[in-house]
């Protein structure tokens, strides 16, 4: 079976090489006929030799089309019925592609993978947040008080753990665009990504259209990959602005202009403080949640067989590439009770 994979590249040639190597290995082991295609939205002249040596055709549109535009271009260039669009900062693990194709053959219009932050597969990355007015309302109320922040975390935590602990495929339209598989018939029915999204939310809006068309999307826990968090946007100063613009565009599309204006009015508030609370070590199984937000979500999560004594140090594989800033480590028991909090600071040694 032919599987077309469109990788939208932007100044990360080494990550792209790792992504293609992993795809090639997995496709071979799964008996899939892999048709990779690189859309080069941005590369330096000194990277072109490396890009040209990779085992995939490279298409240079001559400008940065954005993730949506790059993905759309790639999909138009292939005729395969089964497709994947993905970031170059993802490496599929053995069996990932086969599990996704199996879900599509079983009737899903789209399918998404489970992502880890590390090769040891200890830290699970957060799923996309659910699309609902209540989720959006909680997101803007959370900065107003710790009471609202705690309520938002609890709701998000239940959502995240449903995917983190899933052992079988489950219907879900809250999938990550870092690697998204779909059938061409679904793409043709609901249309391509909206290129009005420069970056972020393009797959969320597409999956919303899929849900509105009553086509099933499926989370497939057997399809696993390592996602090198925020590597593609690490050197892009405009990424925060693109996020804000895309977020507003999505809100207007999903909830209407009036509700969007109401959310923006509510959002004018300070984020609550988050004082350290000791992490107890009493032997109970716990989850460690790691977030760059003082609100504590979305967060990556690692299930520990027993609680840990403070201070808990993140593995260098994760800590090393992280951008400078404050990170919030929260210990939570199986019932969702928060046991402790620690803030860790990563200094900026770049001189900026």
Image: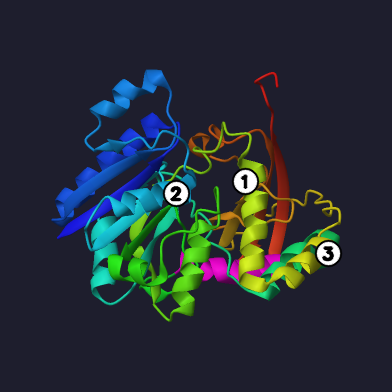
Q: Nearer the viewer, residue 197 or 105?
A: 197
Compared across the picture, whether 128 is left or right of 260 comes to left
Q: Can you identify the residue that label 1 sits on?
A: 242
Compared across the picture, whether 208 is left or right of 293 comes to left
Q: Position of residue 123 (x, y in %)?
A: 49, 51
Describe the element under mark 2 as helix, strand or loop.
helix
Which mark sits nearer the N-terminus, 3 or 2? 2
Which of discs 1 and 3 lies nearer the camera? The answer is 1
Q: Residue at x 38, y 30 (%)?
A: 13
Vertical relation: 174 (above or below) 269: below
- Give the quadrant of the C terminus: top right
C-alpha gap between disc 3 and disc 2 = 33 Å
Describe the element under mark 1 as helix, strand or loop.
helix
Q: Nearer the viewer, residue 227 or 217?
A: 217
Which mark sits nearer the N-terminus, 1 or 3? 1
Q: Position of residue 288 (x, y in %)?
A: 59, 55
Q: Nearer the viewer, residue 77 or 7?
A: 77
Q: Position of residue 306 (x, y in %)?
A: 55, 58
Q: Can you identify the residue that label 2 sits on?
A: 69
The crowding category of the residue bearing disc 3, from other C-alpha atoms within 10 Å (few below 14, some 14 to 19, many at least 20), is: some
Q: Can you identify the residue that label 3 sits on?
A: 266
Which of discs 1 and 2 lies nearer the camera? The answer is 2
Q: Position of residue 84 (x, y in %)?
A: 32, 56
Describe the element under mark 3 as helix, strand or loop.
helix
């Amino acid at each position: 079976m032919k599987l077309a994979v469109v990788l939208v590249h932007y100044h990360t040639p080494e990550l792209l090489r790792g992504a293609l190597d992993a795809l090639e290995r997995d496709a071979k082991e799964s008996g899939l006929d892999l048709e990779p295609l690189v859309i080069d939205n941005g590369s330096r002249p000194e990277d072109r030799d490396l890009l040209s040596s990779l085992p995939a055709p490279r298409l240079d549109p001559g400008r940065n089309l954005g993730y949506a535009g790059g993905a759309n271009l790639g999909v138009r260039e292939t005729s395969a019925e089964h497709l994947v669009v993905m970031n170059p900062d993802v490496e599929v693990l053995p069996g990932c592609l086969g599990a996704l194709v199996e879900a599509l053959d079983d009737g899903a219009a789209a399918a998404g993978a489970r992502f880890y932050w590390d090769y040891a597969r200890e830290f699970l990355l957060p799923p996309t947040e659910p699309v609902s007015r209540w989720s959006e309302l909680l997101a803007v109320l959370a900065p107003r008080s710790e009471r609202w922040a705690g309520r938002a975390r609890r709701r998000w935590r239940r959502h995240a753990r449903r995917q983190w602990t899933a052992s079988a495929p489950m219907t879900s339209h809250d999938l990550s665009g870092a690697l998204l598989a779909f059938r061409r018939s679904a793409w043709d029915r609901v249309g391509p990504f909206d290129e009005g999204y420069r970056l972020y939310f393009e797959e969320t809006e597409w999956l919303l259209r899929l849900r509105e068309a009553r086509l099933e999307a499926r989370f497939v826990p057997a399809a696993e990959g390592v996602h090198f968090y925020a590597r593609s946007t690490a050197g892009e100063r405009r990424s925060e602005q693109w996020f804000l613009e895309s977020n507003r565009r999505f809100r207007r599309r999903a909830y209407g202009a009036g509700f969007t204006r109401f959310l923006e009015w509510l959002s004018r508030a300070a984020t609550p403080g988050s004082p350290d609370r000791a992490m107890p070590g009493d032997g109970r199984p716990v989850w460690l949640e790691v977030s760059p937000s003082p609100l504590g979500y979305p967060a990556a999560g690692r299930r520990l067989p027993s609680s840990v004594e403070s201070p808990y140090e993140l593995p260098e594989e994760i800590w090393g590439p992280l951008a400078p800033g404050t990170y919030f480590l929260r210990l939570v028991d199986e019932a969702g009770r928060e046991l402790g909090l620690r803030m860790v600071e990563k200094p900026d040694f770049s001189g900026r």
